[in-house]
Image (cartoon, rainbow, N blue to C red):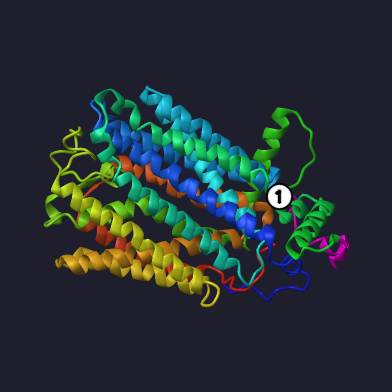
Amino acid sequence: MEVEAAQAGCLEDYLKQTGWGVYHNFILSVTCACLMVHALTFISIIYAVALSSCDALFIPSKNALRIFSGYLIGSASGGLVANSLSDRYGRRRCLTYSLICMFFSSFTAAFGYNTFVVIGATFILGVGLETSAVQIRLLLVEVLCKEKRGFWMAFCNVSWTFGYSLITLILVETPAIFNSTEEGTKLASWRLMFAVSGGASLIMACVCALLEESPRFYLKIGRNYLAYILLKQVYAINKSSFADTFQVREEELSNLIQPYGLNYSEPLSYWSIVKRNCWRVWKSVQLMFSKRFCRISWALMLLKAPVLIVGFFQINLVFARLLMLDDASTERFEGLDFIYPIFQTSEAKRGLNSTSGMCANTNNNQVFYSNFLVLTWSSLPGEILCMLFVDKLGRKFVSFAGFLLASSSCLLMGFMENQWVRMTAACFGMSSLAAALATITLVNMEVFPTAIRGTSNGITSFPGYVLGVFFLNLIAIQPRLFIIVMGISYFCLSIFTCFLPEFKEQPMTE
């Protein structure tokens, strides 16, 4: 399916007249900083639980699964509900609230000494993480011109991955600090990770409050004058000129963004607001699966489900574990192996403590973390290449090539015995998969109109997060068989990319 040529008078034409300057640099900087805080907060969930194994009173493995399951359920709920609310109440408001939500839940997890409190906190943290990741990208993508939209959105993914890689490098070296601290301070030390990420989230909430709302959202809710004033302000800031010289009239912005009958008037009673929002979500789902968007919606759900079930961190962890196994058939991968950044044999999985956990100074741990860090940093070249070529070669080609190379890498790891070949294949797999994921994230925001852009992100992600909960709690598979299955799955995903529309230098759907 190819997108028709840009119609005369599309909003991208008016966005281009505002130029590129201080405001765009500011919103791009805030987006990158927000995504780095997102990476810090996401990693804090995983490593705080793992680092607790350095203490005498560590978090048991079954509770680690419950904590991460709570995070996935929260991400599913946040994507479905909070992102949908952004289509009614605005991107900036939902972004600020989600960051405040991350702040409170992080501090709750930091100071909570009850497992159920920590699980509840990570559930709310999942809501905030999923909502903030989508909303900050929406704020940026809805003000970018069509010629460089792919480049700058991929650049934001590079920022997230750089933050993820840098923080991983720091945290892998953290156990040395725990081993040198006094016994009385060890118990509280790992909780500082939640506290630091919570403080960073609060700072970003204050910074994001300085952003302007999306002009597309203003046009969608019928407040054309606010969109016009915003474009004039951006023009004046970028051009260092008088706003009155902006050669666009308010009347020209009419009918550029269609509300699809999803607007309604307020104030209303609380119960009426709930009913109205449920009605709006239902109408949005109907629009997503109408004849116009049905094929795209199903394609995106099928593309996102496997990469959310076995996410970026999980596949990183699996590759590092596979490189440690001489004979993969003698071990079995269970849910804990996909979330616990500790190398364990099957005999040690149920008995984590300071001698078998993350702080254990063993040769196996050193080799495992070396492999893990190499694979973590190897994802950056793929996203940089995606950034350079996504606007030249197109979304379909980059995502197709990414999934196809990831499939080849997994199959090589499954069938080859040479360690250097497997390491090279794993690095190529991480790099190509990162490029494919960045492209799919971009396409998901381009193919649906402003009226349902937030809701559509939640709907397409929901099955993957829910299935991820069952996957973690039920999986028990031989490592080599698993990596071969993933290779076949990525090959299938490369075929599904053919059903996506091409938005290279095209206006976003409205």
Q: In which quadrant will I find the C terminus?
A: bottom right
Q: Position of residue 99 (x, y in %)?
A: 56, 39
Q: Give the residue number, with chain letter if any, for mark 1.
A: 213
Query: Is residue 272 depicted above or below 493 in this figure?
Result: above
The residue shown at (56%, 50%) is 134
**Residue 123 vertical placement versus 425 (above, below):** above
- Residue 136 at least partly seen: yes
Q: Nearer the viewer, residue 208 or 467?
A: 208
Label 1, secondary structure: give it: loop
Residue 305 placement, left or right of 85:
left
Q: Tell whether position 253 is magenta.
A: yes
Q: x, y percentage for residue 273?
A: 71, 34
Asked whether residue 281 is in view, the answer is no
**Which residue is at the front of the view, 168 or 407?**
168
Query: Is most of the magenta stretch helix, strand or loop?
Result: loop
Which residue is at the front of the view, 467 or 191?
A: 191
Quadrant in the rendering for residue 52 = top left
Write down the region rendered in magenta.
Answer: 244-261
For badge 1, the amino acid type reads Glu
Asked where in the image residue 381 lies, by quadrant, the reply is bottom left
- State the count of labels: 1
The local crowd at label 1, few if under 14, some if 14 to 19, many if 20 or more residues have their Cα within 10 Å, is some
Give the answer, above or below, for where 50 lies relative to 327. Answer: above
Residue drawn at x 11%, y 51% is 330
Given residues 112 and 410, the one toward you in this image is: 112
* Residue 248 highlighted magenta (yes or no): yes
In this picture, residue 391 sits left or right of residue 223 = left
In this image, 425 relative to 247: left or right? left
Residue 58's x, y, as percent? 27, 29
